[in-house]
Amino acid sequence: MRKSIIIAWMVLAVLVMSSCASTSVTRLASDKDMDLSGYWNDTDIRQVASSLVSSCLDGDWMKTFALKKPVVRVGRIINNSSEHIDTAIISQKMEEALINSGKVLFVASASTIADVRQEQADQQYFSADPVKLAAEKGADCLLQGSVRTNIDQIEGKAVRTYYVSLELVNVQTAEKIWVGNDTVKKYITRPKYRF
């Protein structure tokens, strides 16, 4: 009986001590690959953006714009996957890589344009030297796409595949002038029993 009480107190003490353990945080380099859950993460975004930007800039469509840099706008990248994916991050990474390539010019997204136009209108009334209206550059091309997933799983094992598809559309003719796809495939194992 006494042994049972001592063991119960020890178990209780261990539970209390473990519940009081502090959270540990370790800073990582932003380009360090880290995959804890098997879900979509920043490593996947970097991989996809790098692959698709290279493919896009090497495409034959660039020859059409031999005399001037094409002006591009990023449209919507739709999340058609089975999990939450912030596609705005994919859009930003694509935009950043394409701008930094120096091979294309970018105009602001539709949501940003609304703010810019409001600022232009305000300047017409309140600024000593307002900007000229109707001087915006129009986009030659619109980059848009989607993310999809496919999951195959059985008994603690899963293969999670992400398909990222992008297309570049000529705004004047509505022709698709480039299409690119990248796939991220992950094999995930989980223990059958957890505490």
Image (cartoon, helix red, strand yellow):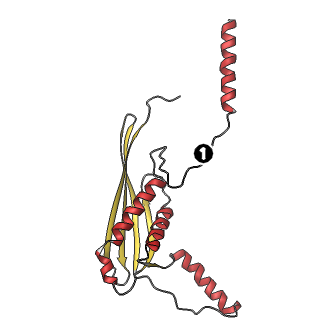
In the rendered image, residue 172, in percent from the top left (x then y), is placed at: 36, 84
Residue placed farthest to the top in the image? 1
Callout 1 amino acid: Thr
In the rendered image, residue 116, in percent from the top left (x then y), is placed at: 59, 81
Residue 79 seen in this snapshot: yes
Q: Quadrant of residue 146?
A: bottom left
Residue nearer the viewer, 132 or 78: 132
Residue nearer the viewer, 86 or 62: 62
Q: Is residue 151 above or below residue 101?
A: above
In the rendered image, residue 153, in percent from the top left (x then y), is placed at: 36, 40
User: Residue visible at 51% across and 77% down?
Assistant: 108
Q: Is residue 35 above or below residue 88?
A: above
- Within 10 Å of the Cα at label 1, are there few (<14), some (14-19), or many (20+) other Cα atoms? few
Q: Is residue 49 left or right of residue 29?
A: left
Residue 175 seen in this snapshot: no
**According to the image, label 1 marks what residue?**
26
In the rendered image, the quadrant that contains the N terminus is: top right
Q: Is residue 113 above or below residue 165?
A: below
Q: Quadrant of residue 26?
A: top right
